[in-house]
Amino acid sequence: MESLFQAADISNVIELSVAPVFLLASISGALNVLSLRLGRVIDRGRRLNDMDLQEGSEQYADIDSEQKLLARRARHIHRAILLCTMSALFVCLVIVILFLDTLFTLALETMIAVLFMIALLCLISGLLIFLKEIELSARAFRFGRYNMMDKK
């Protein structure tokens, strides 16, 4: 009879861990987008690095300005990747502790809740930094002589 009770408990934990698993899938999608954006920033930076321009020229100053912006964007993306990865790791830890709590009756509900909140705070922070990077990218992009962020 006890093994049936434990099987029901494990079944409950599996049901409880479904939501965090969906969260992990969402985080992995965000990490994929962030990685692609970082790759594009790096590719653009490499193209600019390969240009042979005279220091002091107007074009040199423009490229230097763009490289500075690309470095800022890369830092933002890197921080967002770091925070989203930490979020995923905390979600994984929540799932493992859910199972350990059920198997060994450790009464770790508070720890599970705190770890899940930390995971969500890391994700929120990562997404906010991602928004900042998108804003930097949008400000820099031009359609001919028109800036994307112009109100007119």
Image (tube, helix red, strand yellow):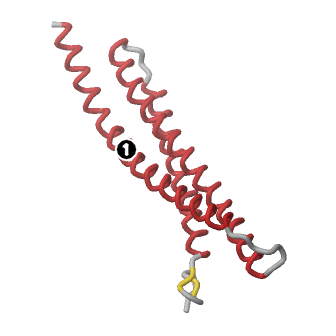
Horizontal relation, residue 97 to residue 77: left or right = left
Tag 1: Cα neighbours inside 10 Å, few (<14), some, or many (≥20)? some
Viewer-closest of 83 and 75 = 75
Viewer-closest of 82 and 66 = 66
Residue positioned most to the right: 56
* Residue assigned mark 1: 23
Horizontal relation, residue 108 to residue 54: left or right = left
Residue in the picture at 41% in, 23% down: 97
Where residue 87 sits: x, y (%)?
Answer: 49, 41
The secondary structure type at the circle numbered 1 is helix
Q: Is residue 108 above or below residue 24?
A: above
Where residue 7 sits: x, y (%)?
Answer: 20, 16
Where residue 102 sits: x, y (%)?
Answer: 33, 18
Q: Is residue 140 above or below residue 75?
A: below
Horizontal relation, residue 41 to residue 36: left or right = right
- Which image quarter holds the C terminus? bottom right
Residue in the picture at 41% in, 46% down: 28
Residue in the picture at 39% in, 51% down: 29
Q: Amino acid at mark 1?
A: Leu
Res 150 quadrant in image: bottom right
Res 151 quadrant in image: bottom right
Where residue 99 sits: x, y (%)?
Answer: 35, 21
Res 92 quadrant in image: top left
Q: Is residue 1 above or below residue 130?
A: above
